[in-house]
């Protein structure tokens, strides 16, 4: 059974190295002392659950190591990946929501920061932090729009090309995930993805070098 994240008891929580954390994110660097004192580190095993759909948000989460995914189950019973968080914030939209609308599950052993939700909201009253949060949300919005546009494309080939061009640089991208996971992101079956990749290679349109994909 997946294990849900729980904060360790007071007095047993390890001290956080904020100097090191500040190098990971401008937002963490600007976080005021009051919010830092309400921040805890949690460990989660692979398949462990950060939160479930319907839970009431209590914290804002930042993934330090590993990977956490926001998942929603489709009518066919397949998992739809809504977000993959690696060394970044998770489920930003939950800040002003009464409950979560999806599940957050660790794709591998992961370490997260849990920043008290009220303390984080209070921190956003500071102009510097609010501006950095707005910049962060704008970048995430661009990613979501690209993903939405990609999912509107009809064929697996079109989605592959769109992914490489928007997520990579110079017509190439480092995949950084299994092809099965990538298929879920693209909204196609892994069989359809493998067929499309093989066809594109055969036609000389794509070069696959391990986890690196390059368009010709």
Image (cartoon, rainbow, N blue to C red):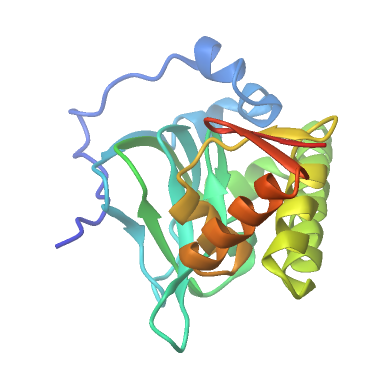
User: In the rendered image, is residue 8 in sight?
Assistant: yes
Which quarter of the figure is the N terminus placed in? bottom left
Toward the viewer: 58 or 71?
71
Placement of 54 over or under 151, stated as above or below: below
Residue at 74%, 49% in the rendered image: 203
Nearer to me, 108 or 62: 108
> Is residue 134 among the parts visible in the rendering?
no
Is residue 90 shown left or right of residue 128?
Answer: left
Q: Please give left or right for residue 61 compared with residue 171 in the image.
A: left
Q: Vertical placement of 107 versus 79: above or below?
A: above
Q: Residue at x 66, y 40 (%)?
A: 123
> Of all residues shown, which one is farthest toward the top?
19
Please provide percent x and percent y for residue 95. Answer: 60, 59
Which quarter of the figure is the C terminus placed in?
top right
Residue 26 position in % (x across, y down): 70, 25
Residue 52 location (% of width, % of height) = 36, 68
Furthest residue toward bottom: 75
What is the total number of numbered labels drawn onto the structure image? 0
Identify which residue is drawn at 67% across, 48% down: 202
Name the quadrant containing residue 180.
bottom left
- Residue 88 is drawn in which quadrant? top right
- In the image, is residue 16 above or below residue 157? above
- Residue at 76%, 42% in the rendered image: 204
Quick check: 210 above or below 90?
Answer: above
User: Please, which residue is most extreme toward the left here?
Assistant: 1
């Amino acid at each position: 059974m997946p294990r849900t994240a729980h904060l360790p008891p007071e007095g047993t929580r390890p001290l956080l190295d904020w100097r090191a954390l500040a190098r990971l994110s401008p937002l963490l660097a600007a976080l005021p002392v009051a919010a830092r004192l309400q921040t805890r580190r949690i460990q989660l095993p692979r398949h462990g659950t950060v939160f479930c759909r319907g839970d009431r948000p209590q914290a804002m989460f930042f993934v330090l190591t590993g990977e956490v995914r926001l998942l929603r189950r489709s009518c066919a019973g397949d998992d739809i990946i809504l977000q993959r968080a690696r060394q970044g914030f998770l489920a930003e939209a939950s800040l002003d929501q009464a409950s979560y609308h999806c599940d957050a599950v660790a794709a591998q052993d992961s370490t997260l920061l849990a920043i008290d939700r009220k303390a984080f909201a209070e921190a956003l009253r500071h102009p510097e932090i609010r501006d950095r949060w707005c910049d962060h949300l704008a970048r995430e919005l661009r990613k979501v729009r690209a993903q939405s546009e990609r999912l509107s494309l009809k064929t697996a080939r079109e989605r592959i090309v769109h992914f490489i061009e928007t997520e990579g640089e110079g017509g190439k991208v480092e995949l950084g995930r299994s092809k099965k996971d990538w298929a879920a992101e693209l909204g196609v079956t892994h069989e359809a993805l493998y067929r499309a990749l093989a066809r594109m290679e055969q036609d000389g349109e794509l070069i696959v070098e391990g986890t690196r994909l390059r368009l010709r």
